[in-house]
Image (cartoon, rainbow, N blue to C red):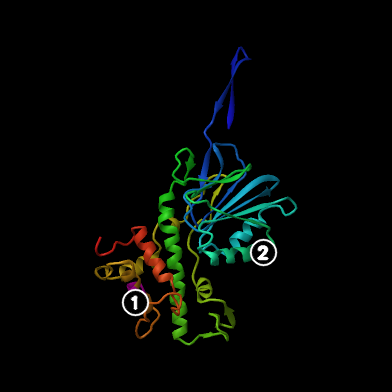
Amino acid sequence: QRRCVVLFENSRPVLSLYIIAMVSYARIPQGKVGRYSGKEGEIGGLCVSPVSGHAVIVIKGKRNGKTSLSLIHYSKYTPTHTLNAERNSFEKSEPMSVYVYFNHLKTNPNLIAVLHTRLQETNIEHELREFPEKQKGLIATFESTSTFDADDDKVDITSHERHADIKKYHLLNAEFRLLQGLVRVGQLTVDGKISHAPGEGKYIKYDGDIYRHPSELADKLTDPLDCTSLIFDDEFQEAGSDDVQLCAFASEVIKDIPKAKCVSEAALAEQLNKTLTSRTHMASPRALSTTDHPFFGGNLVEAAKVLVSTSVFSLANE
C-alpha cells in the first residue's frame, strides 16, 4: 500500500514522495466475527492467527453498496444464526463468495458435515478449502484470501486490546454456560419433566417441544453471556464482561472442586462430574463416561482441558 505525500512551496507543489505504508490485519479471536469495508486507516483486511478452532468462514460481497468482508472464526459454540446473520447482511442481488477453511479436514468430519448442512439449508454456495500443513494463519482482503505460517513475523497483526483475556475466558465461559444448562436439564429429568422421544437418537421432549439433543434444550434454558460477537466492525468493539473475566457459574463450580484430588485432567473431569451431578439433585453421581453421559457427555473432559490450558485451574501436582 502506497501513500503519496506532496510538498508545497509558495502554494506550488515542488516534490511528491511515495511512502510505503505498513498494512496491518485485524485479528479475530475464536468464536468471534469481524467485518471490514475498507474504512480509511492502516487496517487492510481481517486475519486469524493462529487458527484455534477447526473452521474459518470468509464471506465477500456488497454490503450497503460497498465491497465488504465478513470473517467468522468458528467454534462449536457459534450459534447457527451467526452464519445466517452474516450472510443476510450482504446484498442478495450482488455476487457473493463464501470460503470455508478447515483445520484438520480429515480428522473432524462431523463439523464439516454440520457446517456443510447449514450452508446448504440457507442456499449458500461455498468452496471448501483445507489449511495446508503448518499454515495456521489466514488473511482475508478484498483481493484474495490466503493462508500463512502463523509464526511468520513479517505479517503485521493488530489485536483487540483485551485479546489475551478474550482468548482465556470467552470459550471457557461458553463451555460452563452449556454445563449450567445441562445441570438444569438434569434437574428437570430428576423431577420427571423430561421424557425421551421415540427412536434410537437423543431426542428429548420438554414442555410440549422436542429437542434434538440435551444441549439444545440446555442452550434454551440458560441466559446468554455478556459477550460481543461482532468484535471488529471496521474497528475493534468493546468486549463484554464475560469475554474478559470468569463468569459467575464457573467461579462457583471451581470453588467447590477439591484441588487436592485433581492430579490430572481426567481426575479434574471426575470431580467436575461429582460437583455438577450433585447440583442435579441425584442421590449419587453417575459414572463418568464420554458422549453417553445422560447430561454432560464429553463436555466434562473438554471443560477440564480448557480449565488447565488457560491456567484458570492448576492441577495438584503443578
| Neighbourhood count class around disc 2 (C-alpha, 10 Å): few under 14, some 14–19, many 20 upward | few
Q: Position of residue 137 (x, y in %)?
A: 50, 48
Drawn side of residue 60 relative to residue 74, left or right: right
**Residue sitting at x 38%, y 64%:** 305
Drawn side of residue 174 relative to residue 13, left or right: left
Please tell me the numbered disc located at residue 236: none
Q: What residue type is labelled 1?
A: Lys
- The stretch in magenta equals 270-275
Quadrant into which the C terminus falls: bottom left
Drawn side of residue 199 relative to residue 268, left or right: right
Drawn side of residue 119 relative to residue 171, left or right: right
Q: Mark 1 points at which residue?
A: 274
Q: Position of residue 76 (x, y in %)?
A: 51, 64
| Neighbourhood count class around disc 1 (C-alpha, 10 Å): few under 14, some 14–19, many 20 upward | some
Report how far apart the C-alphas of labels 1 and 2 lie in the structure: 41 Å
- The secondary structure that dominates the magenta segment is helix
**Can residue 120 be found in the magenta stretch?**
no
Q: What element carries label 1?
A: helix
Which numbered mark, 1 or 2, is in the foreground of this view? 2
Quadrant in the rendering for residue 285: bottom left
229 vs 68, nearest the viewer: 68
Residue 134 seen from this side: yes
**Residue sitting at x 52%, y 42%:** 25
Q: Which amino acid does label 2 sit on?
A: Gln
Q: Name the residue under label 2.
A: 120
